[in-house]
Image: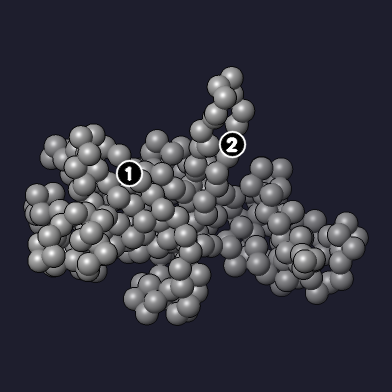
Amino acid sequence: MRVPLHVVVADALRERISSGELAVGAPLPSESELGAKFGASRGPVRQALAQLRNEGLIETSQGRVPTVLGRPLAHSIDDFFSFSAWVQATGRTPGQHTIELAWRVPPADVAAKLQLAASERAVVIVRRRSIDGLPAMLERSWYISEVGRQLFDFDPDEGSIFGALIERGVALDSGTHTIDAVAADAIDAEQLDVAVGTPLLRVERLTSSAGGQLLEYADDRYRTDRAKLAIRNSRSTSAVSRPSVARLASLSPVSSEGVTA
């Protein structure tokens, strides 16, 4: 199936911005130059520019050449355990707002993931995470009781839950992630300022100690214009090389393997 021309133009410009070929503040080629390069009329070119503007990559204004506003930032997978640390490492400002913190009997699927009895309670926390004041992700985390009870001992809006729990000796050592896409429900839409049904990047996380004890299940939903997943493979001398996964930021930072908090 033929790829729409505006998608081709947007992808090419996005790649030039991501690679740094088009630096922050640099002007984009003119509409006529882009049209000539891609054999496109003004319509598809303007569609491509509108898409990049919506992603927060370029700035456009009446009568002025569009300029690069920001570019995706690569993020080491080792630091993905903390949303706050990751955002700070990119030079941006993380934020969080707690919507719910409570003891509850989790849904059956969550209880099964944490290997809890049917009536066993856990602690759930729902927070909206932001980057430079803009909503980027809605996290829903369930903690087993011995870990979750500690969330009531500090203000989760002050920063990283992950960091606070580590300081209290909680062994949040490893995370297994499943990545897919979901449609925004009513709560997602309200908290992330998107329409119901908007596609969101979902990262489901199951966190355990080094000894294998299950400690947390999380469902993190990212706005796709502010968080993307990049997987890079590299050849090595070994027969099998492990891919590295990185979070990227458009307006703000994206990724995969680790624990957000």
Mark 1 / mark 2, whichever is N-terminal: 1
Q: How are the residues colored? A: one colour
Q: In the shown orientation, is residue 30 left or right of residue 86?
A: right
Q: Amino acid at mark 1?
A: Gly
What distance separates the C-alpha of mark 1 from that of mark 2?
A: 20 Å
Q: Amino acid at mark 2?
A: Asn
Q: Residue at x 26, y 56 (%)?
A: 113
Q: Is residue 190 positioned above or below 22 on the image? A: below
Q: Residue at x 77, y 66 (%)?
A: 1
Considering depth in this image, is 170 or 52 the residue closer to the camera?
A: 170
- The picture quadrant where one finds residue 7 is bottom right
The residue carrying pointer 2 sits among few (fewer than 14), some (14 to 19) or many (20 or more) residues within 10 Å by Cα, namely few
Measured as percent of width and height from the top left, residue 260 is found at 33, 49
Give the residue number, with chain letter if any, for mark 1: 175
Q: Give the total number of marks visible in the rendering.
A: 2
Measured as percent of width and height from the top left, residue 203 is found at 40, 56
Secondary element under disc 1, as helix, strand or loop, is strand
Q: In the shown orientation, is residue 45 left or right of residue 39?
A: left
Secondary element under disc 2, as helix, strand or loop, is loop
Instruction: Tell me if I can see residue 154 in this picture.
Output: no
Instruction: Tell me if I can see residue 92 in this picture.
Output: yes
Give the residue number, with chain letter if any, for mark 2: 233
